[in-house]
Image (cartoon, rainbow, N blue to C red):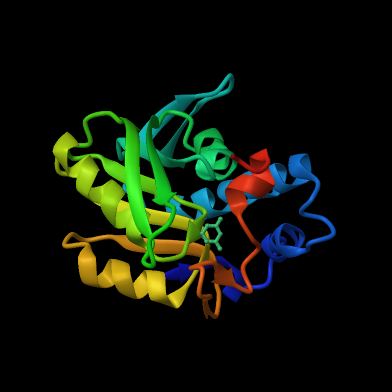
């Protein structure tokens, strides 16, 4: 697992603003900080991809440079992932992009996830990056991956989050029977009784877009 804030960088300032209750109420700034972390985490993931040589003709001569060889698919888990995945899409500008609508079902004691919308490409032999900013219970990621499997067998799977909880990581490790790598900007302490991440930042979807009915 890769944890971005293990190394001091500007990412820590973006994370601090996302968490700070006096700053996170500025929705535009909240979304922008998610996007900025998406850009930084995409850059880190890019170091793990396959590369191939490309000859580039400059106005003076020619040079060879290594460029990404993988066919990338970015899957955005609606709705909270939209600003974070914008960062990924701006870095991996040739990637195909898919969407999965995953929502917590209200009422039950256990968190249950309903998938009510999927629009995703063929993922056969492609490198899939699933973007879900809050890796809390891990259930939406496991359900999303089960759904995506009907779209082919990927070459690699990367799970990208802003904040992860140890319980979610454990659930994913137990329930995803394929190779994957987890990338997160921060690994927090625990989940509370409502399955929110502590210290976390609150409800990422509500903070980015406003409360829903
Ligand atoms: N989703 C959120 O937005 N926040 C959490 O803490 C957990 C899940």
- The residue drawn where x is 51% and y is 58% is 134
Q: Position of residue 174 (x, y in %)?
A: 23, 72
Q: Quadrant of the C terminus?
A: top right
Figure label count: 0
The answer to which quarter of the image holds residue 109 is bottom left
- The residue drawn where x is 54% and y is 23% is 58
Q: Position of residue 69 (x, y in %)?
A: 32, 39
Q: Position of residue 115 (x, y in %)?
A: 32, 42
- The residue drawn where x is 68% and y is 72% is 8
Question: Going by the image, does 169 lie left or right of 174?
Answer: right
Residue 65 in sight in this render: yes
32 or 200, nearer to the observer: 200
Question: Going by the image, does 212 lie left or right of 50?
Answer: right
- The residue drawn where x is 68% and y is 48% is 207
Residue 51 in sight in this render: no
Residue that lies at the very extreme toward the bottom in this rendered image: 189
């Amino acid at each position: 697992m890769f944890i971005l804030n293990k190394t001091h960088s500007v990412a820590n300032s973006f994370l601090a603003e996302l968490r700070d209750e006096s700053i996170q109420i500025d929705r535009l700034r909240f979304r922008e900080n998610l996007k900025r972390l998406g850009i930084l985490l995409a850059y880190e993931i890019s170091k793990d991809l396959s590369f191939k040589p490309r000859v580039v003709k400059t106005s003076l001569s020619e040079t060879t440079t290594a460029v990404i060889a993988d066919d990338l698919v970015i899957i955005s888990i609606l709705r909270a992932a939209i600003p974070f995945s914008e960062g990924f899409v701006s870095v991996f500008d040739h990637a195909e992009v898919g969407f999965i609508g995953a929502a917590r079902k209200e009422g039950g004691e256990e968190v249950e996830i309903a998938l009510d919308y999927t629009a995703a490409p063929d993922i056969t032999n492609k490198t899939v990056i699933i973007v879900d900013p809050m890796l809390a219970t891990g259930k939406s990621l496991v359900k999303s991956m089960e759904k995506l499997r009907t779209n082919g067998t990927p070459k690699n799977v990367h799970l990208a989050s802003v904040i992860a909880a140890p319980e979610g990581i454990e659930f994913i490790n137990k329930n995803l029977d394929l190779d994957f790598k987890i990338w997160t900007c921060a690994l927090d302490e625990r989940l509370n009784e409502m399955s929110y991440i502590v210290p976390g930042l609150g409800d990422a979807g509500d903070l980015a877009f406003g409360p829903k009915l």
